[in-house]
Amino acid sequence: MTQARFDGWVSVFDSGTDYEAEMARDRLTDSGIHAVIMAKKDSSFKLTHGALSRIYILVAPQFEVQANTVLQSDAFTTEELTEIALSTDPEAVEPPLSGASGNGEAG
């Protein structure tokens, strides 16, 4: 399979969801491979499939084989991804302090 190339970088992973891309990037970083995320998502649409929704993980060409090995050997299962997504608790986020809304009022 031919990987996409962007200005000297090679794509080793792509996804339609931010959390999958971040997990893949973190896995590569933990393995000592510098990886970056390049989002090609159209913010006007809430798409997770197709050309308007891709998020790419890019590495330097000399790390392509090593990155693919890391990503294939440690691939998350659908069940693991579902568990991670469902374990996120948006209610656990602290609300902003009063007066920090940026409307000029003191709290």
Image: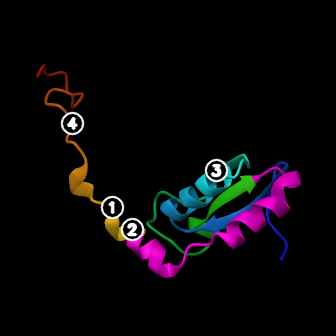
**The disc label shown at residue 30, or none:** 3
Which image quarter: residue 52? Answer: bottom right
Which image quarter: residue 4? Answer: bottom right
Q: Indicate the secondary structure of the residue bearing disc 2.
A: helix
- Which segment is the magenta one? 59-83
Residue at which label 4 appears: 96
Q: Is residue 75 covered in magenta?
A: yes
Sequence-first tag of 4 and 1: 1
Q: Quote the CA–CA distance across marks 4 and 1.
A: 19 Å
Packing grade of label 3 (10 A; few <14, some 14-19, many >=20) is few
Residue at point 83% right, 54% down?
Answer: 63
Q: Is residue 68 covered in magenta?
A: yes
Q: How is the image coloured?
A: rainbow
Residue at which label 1 appears: 88
Residue at which label 2 appears: 85
Please name the amino acid that badge 3 sits on.
Asp
Please name the amino acid that badge 1 sits on.
Thr
Q: Position of residue 20 (x, y in %)?
A: 53, 64
Sequence-first tag of 4 and 2: 2
